[in-house]
Amino acid sequence: MKYAVIFPGQNFQSIKNLNNLAKKYSSIKQNFYEASDYLNCNLWNIIQNLDEQKINFNNYIQPIILTTSVSIYNIWKQKTQKKPIIMAGHSLGEYSALVCSNSINFGDALKLIMIRSKLMQQVSIKNEGLMYAIVGIDKNIINNICNLVSNKEIASIAAINSPDQVVISGNKNSIIKTIKICKNIGAKYIIKLPTKIPSHCILMKDISIIFKKKLKKIKFKNPKYLFIDNANAKFINSESDIKNSLVKQLYNPVLWTDVMKLIEKKIFLSIEIGTKNILSNINKYLIKIKSLTINSEKNLYAALKYILNIKENNKMSKKK
């Protein structure tokens, strides 16, 4: 069974699902304690003391997401001997993919995303930002609307998740103008994302230069698995290409549609590692391959059973 592992970025997190998994698998807390040592703060306590709405605005949300993804993947890895063919991540999820493909060590990834997080917060202080997901309008139409409303302030596409689901990012006033127009022309859904940081747009260009300098101090190895970056939607494996991708994704849109279309050509199953099923839900409307999510013990064993059944069916087919 050829499968890909995909990692979500910053979005709505389920503290409940994470806590339920942690009750079953002590390694999750151990990973959080390890991350806490690197960052000199108690990440697990932060999670326990915040509710679902507030956690996405916490200064430590990015390392929390990384640690969560890496912890769940480690459990998956222990449960199955079948290794993935491809790894990829949506936005911040690219760091999880790099850690789990042995391209960068966990501690270095944590340090990097804390630098990334602080730089992004600096932008949000100077530029009050918003991000919205828009469903039901073609990306080219949304792009034209963004260009129309952008003058001194910016509105632009931050992610192309599927043919009819686009995320926009930019200055607050321009984004509000954009979503008003989208409502008027028949958007099915308009969803405010839980962040005030205008990610993946030109407002991040200045900090990308600073981040590029920070990246020079970090060592990357060739990924253990085929790796797709989300800024270019291409297979990459060299240190220079990985670093260029991490810089570019700060101020360019996430090309998730292209990433998944590329995955679809190579494999028959995608497995999302996270506390919800954001990417798997998108995949239902984007690709024809099976999409599973490991966000609970029940779903973990369902994924293991699915892979086992496929292997058994393949053996039976060969005997016939």
Image (cartoon, rainbow, N blue to C red):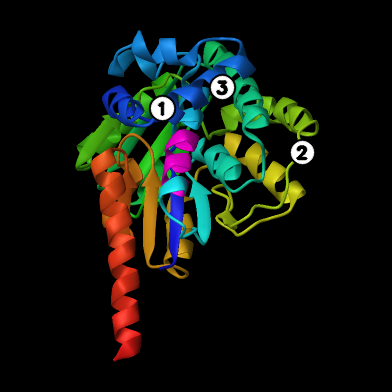
Read off the residue under disc 1.
26
Residue 219 badge: 2
Q: What stretch is highlighted in magenta?
A: 69-77
Q: Earlier in the sequence, mark 3 or mark 2?
A: 3
Three-letter code, disc 2: Lys
Location of the C terminus by quadrant is bottom left
In space, the residues marked 3 and 2 are separated at their CA atoms by: 19 Å
Residue 146, magenta (yes or no): no
Amino acid, disc 1: Ser
Task: Report the quarter where the N terminus lies.
Answer: bottom left
Three-letter amino acid code of the residue under disc 3: Ala
Given contact means CB atoms under 8 Å apart, are the residues at marks 2 and 1 in contact? no
Vertical placement of residue 153 versus 259, above or below: above
Q: Report the predominant secondary structure element of the magenta stretch.
A: helix
> Which percent across, then down, holds residue 130?
41, 23
Query: CB atoms at circles 3 and 1 under 8 Å apart?
Result: no
Query: In terms of sequence position, does the residue under pointer 2 or pointer 1 come before the other?
Result: 1
Q: Residue 35 carries which label?
A: 3
The residue closer to the viewer here, 181 or 303, is 303
Above or below for 31 versus 289: above
State left or right for residue 137 relative to residue 155: left
Q: Can residue 137 be seen in this view?
A: no
